[in-house]
Amino acid sequence: MAAQGLSYGPLGKHCAHLCVDMQRLFAEPSEWATPWITRVLPRIVSLVERKADRTIFTRFIPAARAGQGAGTWKRYYERWASMTMEAIGPEMVELLPPLPAFCPPAKVIDKHVYSPWPEGRLQTELANRGIDTLVITGGETDVCVLATVLGAIDIGYRVILVTDALCSSSDATHDALMTVYHQRFAQQVETVEMEVVLSAWD
């Protein structure tokens, strides 16, 4: 019998919580500030408190300095020179408080592009744990979360998107992406609120 709000049944021991890029550089005054991030943080904390041993945080690590990176990433970091590691300092890539307090048992995996999949560490970690289902939270809905979801779909994971635990710096593209997730990926992506996840994950 399917859990209420979940199309394909309850969540169990083969499920992990993947929290995307809940970092200081997206919360504090900067060119990448995401105003909603503090609004969704308490909901994310409520899940991490229950499932810290099942939580993996990704962190986006910018280039060291302006102009670094392969291909178009070089142009990207010329445009965003103010957000390189040289400019912001290492403390800004840290997770937002109180999330670091859950590590360990929660795990942190760093990445240098939007998607956590190309560098291979995340998939190796999930495979070692026998994970087949991902509960995804974090930001941004229309950038790094999008890249995370599409990669997870291609690999074959069941994806649970927690709609009230996602954030973006753009209301319009957040709403557009939620429509896409609902209408175009219904076989692979389920969209539910945090209350449903908390009640459906034993």
Image (cartoon, rainbow, N blue to C red):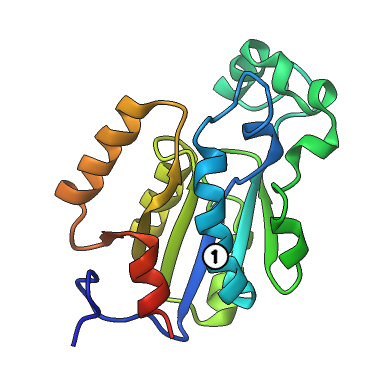
Q: Position of residue 149 (x, y in %)?
A: 39, 52
Among the 4 quarters of the image, the one containing residue 86: top right
Q: Residue at x 35, y 79 (%)?
A: 200
Q: Position of residue 178 (x, y in %)?
A: 27, 43
Disc 1 residue type (three-letter): Ser
Q: Would you name the residue on which mark 1 appears?
A: 46
Front-most of residues 196 and 55: 196
Whether residue 149 is situated above or below residue 73 in the rendered picture: below
Whether residue 71 is situated above or below residue 157 in the rendered picture: above
Q: Quadrant of the N terminus?
A: bottom left
Left or right, 141 with reference to 139: left
Front-most of residues 181 and 36: 36
Q: Residue at x 55, y 54 (%)?
A: 42
Whether residue 4 is situated above or below residue 141 in the rendered picture: below
Q: Position of residue 183 (x, y in %)?
A: 15, 48
Q: Position of residue 144 (x, y in %)?
A: 49, 41
Q: Residue at x 50, y 72 (%)?
A: 16
Left or right, 32 with reference to 178: right
- Badge 1: residue crowd in 10 Å (few <14, some 14–19, many ≥20): few
Task: Check the image and name the residue furthest to the top.
Answer: 79
Residue 114 is at least partly visible in this image: no
Q: Quadrant of the C terminus?
A: bottom left
Among the 4 quarters of the image, the one containing residue 172: top left
